[in-house]
Each structure stands twice: as C-alpha cells, then as structure tokens.
Image: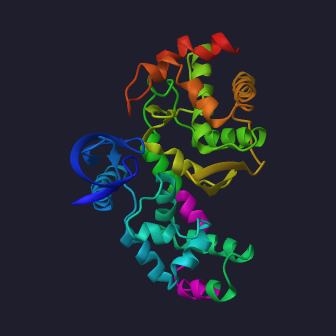
Amino acid sequence: MKVYCPYCKKEVDYKIEERQLKEFRGIEINTYENVAICKECNNDLYVDKIESDNNKRIYEIYRDKANIIKPQDIIELREKYNISQRELTSILGFGKMTINRYEKGGVPTKSQSDYIKLLIASNNEFIKKASEAYKNGSISQKTYEKIISKQENNKVSKEDIQDLYRKHIKEILNRKPDIYNGYTQLDLEKIENIISYIASKVKNLTITSLNKYLWYIDMLSFNQRSLGITGLTYQHEKFGPTIIEQEYNEISLLDDKYKREDYENENGTITKIVSNKNFDLSKLNENEIHIIDTIIKLLKDKTVTDISDMSHKEEGWKKTKRFERISFEYAMNLSMLKNNI
C-alpha cells in the first residue's frame, strides 16, 4: 500500500516503526505508537488508519489512568436533558465542534473532564450553568425551559453540593501533621480565604499559578517559622508543584469566597480564579499575612510560564520524581530566597 510523501512529492511505499510512548498530557501511559516511515527518504509520514489506531490505543489508556470522562457519559448527559450537541456546547461555552469531537472519541482536558463530570453528578450545577447561558444569550428560552422542566422534581441545594465538596476535600487532604504538610493541620476555611485574598491582588490568576502561590507561601512560611500555613500536601507535577491528587480542581469549585471561570482556547481550557472580595484574614497572624504578601509581590507580575519555570529551579521539584510528594525539608534552601527576597 502506498501513501503520498510530501518530501518525495509522490506516492511511496512505507514501513512501520514501533515507538515507545511513556506519557500523554503529563500522565504516564507506557504504551507504543506505530509510525509510518517513507522507504525512500526515511521521513515520518501521516497515515490516517495508523494514526487512528494509535489514538484509540493511547486515549483508552489515558482515560483509564487520568479518570477522563467517556464519550457515552456525555451522550447520556445530553439525552437526560433532551438537548443537542450544539445546545450543550453553548451551555458549556466550549468551541463549536468540541462536544461533537468528544462524543466521537476525542479526549477532553482533565479540567474539562472534571467539570463535565460535576455537571453530570449535580443537577443543581447543571441548572446553574444553563441559567448563566440563558442570561448571557448563549441558549434560547425554549432550550432553557426544556432543561428546567426536566428537573422540577429533582432539586438539590447549592449548600448541599458545597458541603459534599468540602467533605471530599477533607477526606483526601486532611492528615496528621508531618514533614509533607509543614507540620500543620489542614484548615480549609483558612485556605479559601487565602485563595480569595490572592485572587483579589492578582489579575488573571490561573489555577496552575495558584498551586505555585500556595506552595511558595507554605515553603516560605516553613523556612521562616518551621511551620506551613495551609496544611496542604504537594507533589511533583510536570509544570511544577501542585496540591496532591489534583485536589486543586475540587478546591476551585468552592464558591463562597471566590468563583471559578473556565475559558477555552486552542490549547484547551484555562481555569481562572476570581475573588468574591469577601475574604476574612482574621485566622491569620501578621507574620503569616506578611509571608503571603511577599509571595504575591514576587509572583503577581510574572506569567504562568515564568512561575512554572521558577518552581522548576527549586530543589523540592528537581530532587523529586513525578507524582512524588515534596518534603518541606526543601524549604530550607529555596532558590527564590537567593534571587528575589
């Protein structure tokens, strides 16, 4: 079987080479992909059937490893509310063909997947999202009424949903004080107020950067006081330290002190945190507030990439492996102390 080679500018025979693929979107998948190679010039070629088979294999492993939503789950969500792909896309604020692509096997980003799962699990959240879409003109009154009519007898309060979030977060993150949480007990209320405070001071605070803000705050606190502030535990991820088990996603959905805003671009979904400006810092002492202000001053004018690169220079990231917890011992030799403070 021949295929067109853009390098040779003609139809050519090709051979297939098996190449190992260790990770996909930052998740270890340890599989392989087949690559078509021109027998005349030895350049890689695109063969639709081969790439399709590769994607199917890779996506299946990635979905399982990263707990990504399946196409059938999205189809069932639409069927539950009797809405079209176009209507669901409008409600979510995704690109025009996004839902169509996902239902055909395309893989959402982790944040998109988690958010769609939330809407599937929570009738109240879906109604809330549909209401926002109706108010801003993204969906028609007919579509909105169709969705509301399906849920008249199945209402869940916002308070119930938020309580479930908090219970889940505490179950995952609450642990005895040790070197991995800065010898500090988890205080979710304090964390929410700190996040709201940071978001009030930082324009365009992304969830990726927020992880670094919190990590640097806790590390600087441990450096100066031998105690963290939040009680959070962090792990090594591709783009720097993050809260373990990706619990930053659930924390971002708490909406008493701040709100989460998702935007889609060509690279996927960007999640931003916007302060409700009702934070309460009474649980923090002056020294803790000073530490938080120091990190805000240091990072607020830096891009997401700059902050990520900065965290990659820290021993806590360099001397740990992917998904490994980061000990607060590394706080005693912070690179940012030498270079910025």
Please tell me which residue is depicted at 74% across the width and 44% down the height of the picture: 279
Task: Specify whether 7 is left or right of 50.
Answer: right
Quarter holding residue 260? bottom right
282 in relation to 66, above or below: above
Task: Specify whether 142 is left or right of 300.
Answer: left
Closest to the observer: 315 or 186?
A: 315
Residue 294 lies, in percent from the top left, at 73, 23
Quarter holding residue 269? bottom right
Residue 115 lies, in percent from the top left, at 52, 60
Residue 301 lies, in percent from the top left, at 75, 31
Quarter of the image with the N terminus in it? bottom left
Question: Does residue 68 appear in this view?
Answer: yes
Please tell me which residue is depicted at 39% across the width and 46% down the height of the picture: 7
Residue 140 in magenta? Answer: no
State whether the magenta stretch is mostly helix, strand or loop.
Answer: helix
Quarter of the image with the C terminus in it? top right
Which range is magenta? Answer: 145-164
Question: Does residue 156 appear in this view?
Answer: no
Closest to the observer: 272 or 107?
A: 107
Task: Specify whether 26 is left or right of 209.
Answer: left
Quarter holding residue 67? bottom left
Closest to the observer: 301 or 244?
A: 301
